[in-house]
Every structure is written in C-alpha cells, then in structure tokens.
Amino acid sequence: MHLYPELILEALAKVRYPGTGKNIVEAGMVEDNIRIEGRKVSFSLLFDRLNDPFIKSIVKAAETAILTCISPDVNIKGNISVRSRQDARPEPEKLLPEVKNIIAVASGKGGVGKSTVSANLAVALAGMGYKTGLLDADIFGPSQPKMFNMEDARPYLEKIGNRELIQPADNYGVKLLSTGFFVKKEDAVLWRGAMASNALKQLIGDANWGALDYLIIDLPPGTSDIHLTLVQTLAVTGAIVVTTPQEVALADARKGISMFAGDKVNVPVLGLVENMAWFTPAELPGNKYYIFGKEGGKRLAEALNIPLLGQIPLVQSICESGDAGSPAALNPDTATGAAFRELAENVIKRIEYRHTHMEPTKRVETHK
C-alpha cells in the first residue's frame, strides 16, 4: 500500500461540512500538515471555533472516508487533531504580490547539483513561455552569474514610484539576482549570519522583480539562518529537494525534507529531484551506468511519500554547458534538455494540483 497526501485529500473530499454543504477540502478545513509514516496518517482539521457542534461527526466521517476509500489497514483513528483557524500559523505577508509562485530549491549537502537544477529549471520554465525569475540565495557560494554567462553584469538602481529598486539582470528570458554581482568573483564572502540574512532580504524586497509566474530561489546547501529568513520573509509556494542516488546524500536529503516539514519552517515539499541518476557517455547515448547507486532518490521519495519530480542523468555536456554559461535546458531536443523540460512540467503539475486541492479559496492561477 503506497500512501501519499493527494490520495488522502481525494478521500477527504468525500466528506461534507453540514454548515455549508462544501466538502472539507474545498472549504479549506484540511490543514497543510498531512504526515505519513508507513501506514500511519495524521493531520489537522480547522474549524472556525472549537465548540463547533459538527466536530465529532466530521472527524468520524474523515476517518471512515480514509478507511473506506483507501484501505481499512490505514492507521488513522485517533490521529486527526482539531484546531481553530485563529490558532493556525498566519501566512507571511506577501512581499512580492506580483509573483504568483515562489519555489525554493534546496539540498541537504553541497555538491549534488542544486544550483545546476535551479538554473535549468528556470530556463526550462522561461522556454515554455512563463515569466520567470531566479534568486541566487546561496550567499556564500553564488554560482548563478557564471551559469548564466553574466559574471560581469552589474545590476543598477531604477526609480520606481518613490523607491529606488535593484533592476535584475536578464538572460535566456530569466530575471536574475545574486550576491555574485556585488562582490569580486575571486573573493570569499565573509559575512556573519545577520549580514547574510539582510543581504537576502534586500535582494528580495528591494528589487524590481515585476510580474512573474515563477520565482526560483537557489538556497544554500544544508540548513541555516538563510532558510528561516526566506520563509519568514516570503510566502513560499513549495520546496524542491535535490539529491544524488548515493546513501550519504540521501541521508542529508532526508534531513532537508524534515526541515521544511518542521514547525519552524512549515513549507510544503513539492517533491524530490534525483540528480546524477546515471552516467551516459556521449558516444554511447543509450547506455546507463549507475556510478552513484541506482534509484536511491526514487526509493527515498517512495519511503517519504513525496513525488519524484525528475531523474537527471550525469552527462558531460551538463557540466560543460554550466561552465560555459549556456544551461542545458536551452536545448530541449537533447536528452538532458528533455530531462529538465520534464522536470519543469512536473513542477507545474504539482503546483497546480496543490492550488486546486489544498488551497481552493486562495488559488493562484498560472498562465503562460
């Protein structure tokens, strides 16, 4: 039995709240905190008041729907908590009202290709016709200027209304900001945590991002103040965690996923990306060599009941194109370009599904 949040939501959509006649998913009564551990499922239901006369009957109906629609073996009884809407964590103030979707790309450790995935995801989205921005929030190791062939770019201030805002650089249809634009590329960034957090806030709030369908944020590896600053500053739509198939990377990826699901961060995990899934030599494009292990990311996604958004092969051209400032996603007809295009399509589907099933009263439409 394979459980995942969407399956739980489909079952809960069968339960209607007597006061309005709407199903409890449509009414926004299912809090975005569905936890799945093996066969155990737990989550919270939100009510306008804790003395609502329908609480017991709704909880019972939710349990019955899951056991009936999914499996009688699901451990759900006693695992549905009830909370008042007033007690639910308030959403961060929307700092970028013209940005429809904000996607954080993270990794548990460095060296797994998080920045490469971020750059190519942004380029793929832009190539599909979406207005896209990329914020390089890896303050201490900014790499996006090189990947976009813009190491010499120097963003300027532009007066917008009564404010002077940083104008992002632009290449391949992607608006880009990075601390790499403001420091010498050969110099190390020696900032304390507060300085890094303030720099990130400035790149977010003091920039002229304009209207965007997607803003991709390339986070530093691991967990840090930067991650907390991000979720406290922006209403993040969801996070993508990047890993390689090897066990040491998977262990750190699991920690990264746990961080986003924790109470301090509480950002939905859109899914996992398995980078360097296999090696394919250019002269033998049909061959796959699993030099870092086979399908470790796929197994982790299944174990944690989150979607596997994509498997990106390890091909020499990906590294070369990144170093040359020409992301592989610019060529969707190649195997690597197609892999990043598929990743972008899966991310879009995942976000649209969440807008439809998780936040029906606050749906954000995404248009080309």
Image (cartoon, rainbow, N blue to C red):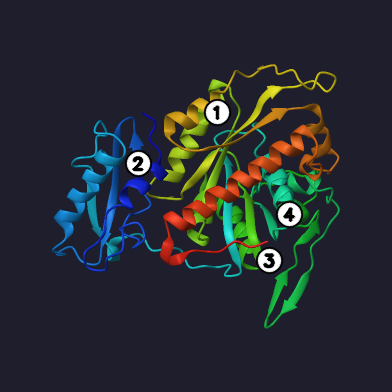
Q: Position of residue 41 (x, y in %)?
A: 30, 39
Quadrant for the N terminus in the image: top left
Q: Which residue matches tag 4?
A: 126
- Quick one: label 3, few (<14), some, or many (20+) residues within 10 Å? many
The residues bearing labels 1 and 4 have C-alpha atoms spaced at a distance of: 26 Å
Q: Nearer the viewer, residue 67 or 230?
A: 67
Q: Position of residue 229 (x, y in %)?
A: 52, 55
Q: Which residue matches tag 1?
A: 297
Q: Which SS class for mark 4?
A: helix
Q: Nearer the viewer, residue 95 or 189?
A: 95
Q: Which residue matches tag 3?
A: 209
The residues bearing labels 4 and 2 have C-alpha atoms spaced at a distance of: 33 Å
Q: Earlier in the sequence, mark 1 or mark 4?
A: 4
Q: In this rendering, is residue 10 above or below 289?
A: below
Q: Please, what is the three-letter code of the amino acid marked with disc 2?
A: Arg
The residues bearing labels 2 and 3 have C-alpha atoms spaced at a distance of: 35 Å
Which residue is painted at 79% across and 60% down in the image? 169
Q: Position of residue 344 (x, y in %)?
A: 65, 46
Q: Quadrant of residue 187?
A: top right
Q: Earlier in the sequence, mark 1 or mark 2?
A: 2
The residues bearing labels 4 and 3 have C-alpha atoms spaced at a distance of: 15 Å
- Quick one: label 4, few (<14), some, or many (20+) residues within 10 Å? many
Q: Earlier in the sequence, mark 1 or mark 3?
A: 3
Q: Which residue matches tag 2?
A: 35
Q: Is residue 368 left or right of residue 3?
A: right
**Visible residue check, residue 79:** yes
Q: Nearer the viewer, residue 155 or 345?
A: 345
Q: Are marks 4 and 3 in contact (CB under 8 Å)?
A: no
